[in-house]
């Protein structure tokens, strides 16, 4: 297994990655999921795409990955400080005159569908906060018992001054937080950074629609405790990697560390990985400013969601990136070139008779097998093996370095450029086709080849084309058209070129 380095937000440096349980190859990841009160925006999805590549790359490197990605359907407030603002779900529910759970159900389904469109693998567990209240209450009870939490008239709070490690991740300590971050501080709290574990149905939260009974009265959980409870329940007390957007560092992740480690007495997560934010046309994007785009906007403008996926991976995941339609348009051109490289070369292999029968719809594993079988019959087999080995080493070297997808893509593009100049039966071309399929297991930006193309004997097609040509020459356009339709029914499209020449294209739907 290669040595993988990640930038750990906790230690603020690149660190060699090793799984918690030494000798095991299982990796446990907790990924903060969406708050399902609205459509996820492109900043959210940039983050989820990046973590999908993390997931896929660890598997590519030989690890077994277990992932929890929660659904937040209660307790996440419109302001970072939960003493202000209101529950995002409840605010939306009031606006659209539905129940919070109806709103949550709707946006959860949309989110899962959109993740699929972006080739994001489903997590092993997708727990909902509202279904995990008991586990949260258990932790809150323990924190009170251990003296890390205290009860007030309006809730139960975590005492950040009691936890010595508070501030390790974000730099915000119990004594002082970033200037101007807080306007009004709840007078019932001991320290400004103390956060709610449980909120009671009193005062401004009196009319909260979702509530549960608890030893501290009717109420609902704070946002941060949800993630700790779900991580513990599905992954255990110590996990390998915790992911999220940079905006989750404070207060969300800082609070998760405090309550989790105070509860268990162990390190909560070894690695904390954070993705950079997305700006739109140079401006900070935020749901409250309503200058954010969703995947629906991208699709409405005619872009394949996978073009957006490619765009999200063209920069290092930690960088802040700027979104613009022009940039997406440029990405689309590159994306199309790569898609065409793959399809045209497969088509050529079929036309040349090198491959007897092939179903392009099969997954990449099947396609890779077909290419290797073809290579074995050719004299360049050993050279090809060397080519693949060296190419993949370069790719992994880039990815091992904190998932540098930017470099990985430049390696890929260079490889295709070189292959384009070579004939179909060459080390460079077959090699590029194999590596493209291999790397797509990690980058997952290429679309499925949708149409089942059964091999129609090229000879037969050639005959039909000749007949069509003759018909055209003799002015029998009706017949020419009939033959064209027949050819098209077999999965080919004829592109008429200048001077009576033509080109065949395998059609997709
Ligand atoms: Zn979280």
Image (tube, rainbow, N blue to C red):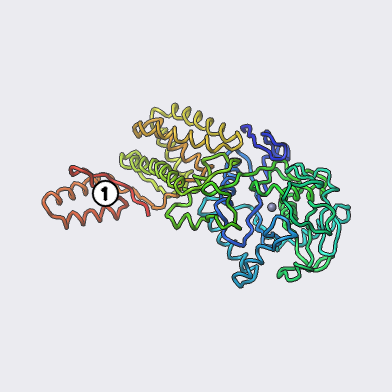
Q: Residues within 10 Å of mark 1 (few under 14, many from 20)?
A: some
Which of the 4 image quarters holds residue 1?
Answer: top right
In the image, taking residue 225 as reference, residue 364 lies left or right, namely left
> Which residue does the image show at 86% across and 48% down from the upper left?
162
> Which residue does the image show at 83% across and 43% down from the upper left?
164
> Which residue does the image show at 60% across and 44% down from the upper left?
276
**x, y (%) of residue 503?**
26, 44
Tell me the quadrant of the picture where the C terminus can be found: bottom left
Which of the 4 image quarters holds residue 80?
Answer: bottom right
**x, y (%) of residue 212?**
76, 68
In the image, taking residue 80 as reference, residue 356 lies left or right, namely left
Nearer to me, 137 or 98: 98
Residue wearing tag 1: 494
**x, y (%) of residue 463?**
21, 46
Nearer to me, 91 or 479: 91
Nearer to me, 391 or 15: 15
**x, y (%) of residue 271?**
70, 41
């Amino acid at each position: 297994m290669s040595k993988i380095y990640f930038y750990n937000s906790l230690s603020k440096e690149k660190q060699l990655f090793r799984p918690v349980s030494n000798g095991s190859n299982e990796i446990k990841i907790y990924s903060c999921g969406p708050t399902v009160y609205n459509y996820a925006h492109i900043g959210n999805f940039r983050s989820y795409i990046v973590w999908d590549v993390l997931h896929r790359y660890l598997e590519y490197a030989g690890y077994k990955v277990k992932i929890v990605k929660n659904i937040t359907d209660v307790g996440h407030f419109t302001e970072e400080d939960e003493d202000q603002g209101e529950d995002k779900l409840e605010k939306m529910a009031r606006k659209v005159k539905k129940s919070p759970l109806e709103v949550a159900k709707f946006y959860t389904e949309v989110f899962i569908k959109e993740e699929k469109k972006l080739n994001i693998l489903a997590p092993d567990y997708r727990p909902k906060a509202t279904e995990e209240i008991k586990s949260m209450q258990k932790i809150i009870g323990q924190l009170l018992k251990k003296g890390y939490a205290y009860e007030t008239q309006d809730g139960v709070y975590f005492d950040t001054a009691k936890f010595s490690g508070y501030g390790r991740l974000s730099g915000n300590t119990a004594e002082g937080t970033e200037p101007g971050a807080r306007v009004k501080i709840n007078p019932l709290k001991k320290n400004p950074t103390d956060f709610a574990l449980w909120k009671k149905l009193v005062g401004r939260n009196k009319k909260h629609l979702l509530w549960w009974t608890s030893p501290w009265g009717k109420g609902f959980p704070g946002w941060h405790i949800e993630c700790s409870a779900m991580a513990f329940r599905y992954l255990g007390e110590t996990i390998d990697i915790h992911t999220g957007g940079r905006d989750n560092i404070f207060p969300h992740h800082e609070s998760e560390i405090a309550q989790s480690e105070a509860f268990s007495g162990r390190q909560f997560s070894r690695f904390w990985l954070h993705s950079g934010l997305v700006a739109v046309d140079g401006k900070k994007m935020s749901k409250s400013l309503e200058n954010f785009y969703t995947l629906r906007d991208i699709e409405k403008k005619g872009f394949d969601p996978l073009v957006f996926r490619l765009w999200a991976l063209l920069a290092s995941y930690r960088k802040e990136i700027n979104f613009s339609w022009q940039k997406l348009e440029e990405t689309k051109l590159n994306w199309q070139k790569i898609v065409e490289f793959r399809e045209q070369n497969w088509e050529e292999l079929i036309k040349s008779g090198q491959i007897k029968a092939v179903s392009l719809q099969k997954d990449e594993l099947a396609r890779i097998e077909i290419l290797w079988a073809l290579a074995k019959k050719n004299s360049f087999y050993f050279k090809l093996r060397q080519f693949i080995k060296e190419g993949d080493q370069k790719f992994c070297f880039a990815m091992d370095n904190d998932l540098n997808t930017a470099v990985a893509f430049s390696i890929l593009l260079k490889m295709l450029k070189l292959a384009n100049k070579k004939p179909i039966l060459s080390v460079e071309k077959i090699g590029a086709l194999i590596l493209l399929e291999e790397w797509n297991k990690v980058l997952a930006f290429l679309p499925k080849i949708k149409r089942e193309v059964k091999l129609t004997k090229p000879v037969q097609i050639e005959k039909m084309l000749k007949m069509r040509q003759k018909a055209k020459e003799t002015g029998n356009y009706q017949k020419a058209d009939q033959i064209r339709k027949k050819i098209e029914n077999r999965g080919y499209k004829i592109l008429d070129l200048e001077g009576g020449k033509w080109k065949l294209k395998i059609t997709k739907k």
